[in-house]
Structures are given as structure tokens and as C-alpha cells.
Amino acid sequence: MQVAHGWTDLSAAPAPTARLGPETGAEAAMPERSEGRGRRAWGLFVRNRTAMAGLIGIVLIVLAALFGPLVYTQSATEADIFNLVNNAWPSAAHPLGTDKDGIDILARLLVGMRVSLGVAVFAEVINVAIGVPIGLAAGYYGGAVDFVLSRVADVLFAFPGLLLAILVAGVFGPGVGDAAGGLARLALVVASLSLVGWPLMARYVRAEVLSLRERAFVEAARAIGASDRRILGTHIAPNVVGLALTAATLDMAGVVVAEAVLSLLGLGVQPPHASVGLMISNAIGVLNLNWTESLFPGLALTLLVLCFSFVGDGLRDALDPRTLR
């Protein structure tokens, strides 16, 4: 995961441009930004072959995670005691082989992808829900509001991101898991990753708002008496949607890796639940017996990270204001 320090030395994405119509001032720019620019951005994204390949890959992975266990009915938590084979190589009965407990690897991988995708999605939803409003408030109002929010973020920036997540999961994980079960432990993983993720989202948004609030269309809105709430909701927030979406998509790749690391260290989900990181962790001890046990989860993790990275890069290019003029 990316880690930054402080609010200074911001490298914000270029702010979207707006055109003021002579007859309607700030309001004239909004339909063109929301509709025409959206169509052009989608056209640019579609023409990016790498981004489209990543999007197709994510769709296929999501479909496999959602519906794969319904089609492939092997158990992901229990071995076939009538045909028990531990550390089996890929075969017709078990296309990806079995693990050290005789459980089908493909079945566990399909379920494990659900965990990885779920953690990434929920972590980014929390990051956006917390980081975007804080970034909007800090960038637009400045002053004491900016100072207080900046210091809160600085406290979190002072810790290396992944290490802070490991600390939270390591300290509270066992107690939460014993008290409330595996799903509660998974929720703690999501919370720990969000704890180190939202300040970076807030920083991106704040930097963008600092630029947007000085633009002509915002000044025109102030001149006609628009309230701060209307300016934020109508003129500024829509212009940071692309930035937030791009940042969240790119950060998903880091969240997937971070969840795998937590599971690899035994701080994420625990058996009988499955995750990609947990599968890799369990396979390390049997590399000399069957290296495919770690190969297939590793390939799945790599593919997922690459797809999110490709889509994030495509969104960044498609939503770049310089390409939408």
C-alpha cells in the first residue's frame, strides 16, 4: 500500500477544466462536464486495450468468485474422505490438485477470491466514505478545519501503512476472532486496512479541491450567491469523482496484496475459511512435495493485482482533463 507523510509536497492530479458560458455563468459548464466529458472518457477507456483487458479480467474473476462454487461443487472446507489424497498434483478429479489436508485447491481458491475481492471492495468503500468528505472539507474551508484534519492524518501518516495494519490485526485479531468468529476477524482486517488508507484518499481530494476552489466557475458561483453546500455538491464534488475513482481502483491492488500479507502472517482469516494469502501460507511448508499448491494461488493473486492496476491506469488516462478538452 502507498504511504505518504504530511500534507505538504502534494502531487495532485491535474484539476478538471470548466468552461463558463456567457449567459449562465457557472451553471453552463455542468451539463457538458457530466455528460459530454463522461462519454469522451468512456471512449478513451474503451480504446485502451490494456485497460479493457484488465476490466474483462476483473469481470471474469468476479463471476468466477460469485458463481464458481455453485458450478464446481467440491467442498472448500472438507476433504473427500472416500477418496482422500493429500498434496495431490492436478488431475481430472481435482483440476488444481489438493492441499496438505486433502481439500480441493480449486474450490478453496474460488472461495478465497471472494474474501480477497470483498476485503478490497469494502476497504475502498470505507476509504472513499471517510477520505472524500474530509478532503473536501479540508481543501475548501482551510483554516482551523484544515489544520485539525491535517494533524489527524499526520498522526496516521507517521506509521508505515502495512505495519500499522499488522499491529491492529495482531493486537485485536485473536480476541475479536474468539469472541465473534471468523467474519468479525475479517471485518477487523478491513478496518485495519482502511485505517491506513483513508488519509491518502483525503490527501488526494484535498489537493484537488485546493486547485478547484480558485477556478473561475467556482468564483462565478460565489458571485451569484451560491451557498458553500451548493458549491461543494454541484461544482466541486463532481470534479473529484474521477480522481477518487482512479485512486480507489489503483489502491485496490495494494489492498489485495496487504490482505494476502496479513493472511500469510496468520493475522487474517483463519481455517476453515479461505483466502488467497492463507492458501499461499499453508502451501509454503509443502513446496518440496507439490509446488503447484502455491503456484495457482500466487497466479490468481498476481492476475487480480494486474487487472486492478490496468483498470486504474486506464481510468487515470481517460479522466485526465488534458485529454478531455
Image (tube, rainbow, N blue to C red):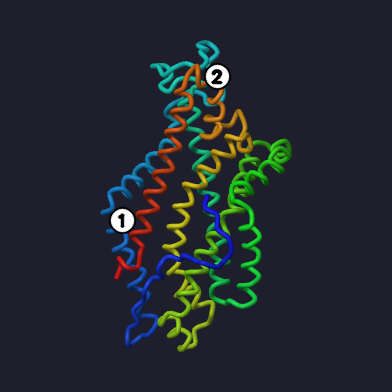
- The amino acid type, in three-letter code, at marker 1 is Phe
Residue 222 placement (x, y as % from top left):
48, 85
Q: Residue furthest top?
A: 82
Quadrant of the snapshot with the C terminus: bottom left
**Residue 302 placement, left or right of 5:** left
Left or right of residue 106, residue 278 in this image: right
Q: Secondary structure at mark 2?
A: loop
Residue at 45% from the left image edge and 26% from the top image edge: 106
Q: Quadrant of residue 72?
A: top left
Q: Is residue 103 above or below residue 200?
A: above
Disc 1 residue crowd, few under 14, some 14–19, many 20+, Cα 10 Å: many
Compared across the picture, whether 2 is left or right of 191 comes to left
Q: Residue 64, located in which quarter of the rendered image?
A: top left
Q: How many numbered marks are there?
A: 2
> What residue sits 59% from the left and 64% below the top?
6
Q: Assess whether mark 2 and mark 1 are in contact (beta carbons under 8 angstroms).
A: no
Mark with earlier residue (1, 2): 1
- Find residue 87 and report its horizontal and vertical position in percent: 50, 17
- Taking the spot 46% from the left edge, 57% from the top edge, the residue there is 247
Q: Which mark is residue 100?
A: 2
Quick check: 224 above or below 86? below
Q: Residue at x 43, y 85 (%)?
A: 220
Q: Secondary structure at mark 1?
A: helix
Residue bearing the label numbered 1:
45
In the rendered image, the residue lying farthest to the left is 47
Mark 1 to mark 2: distance in Å?
44 Å
Indicate left or right for 183 with 240 as reference: right
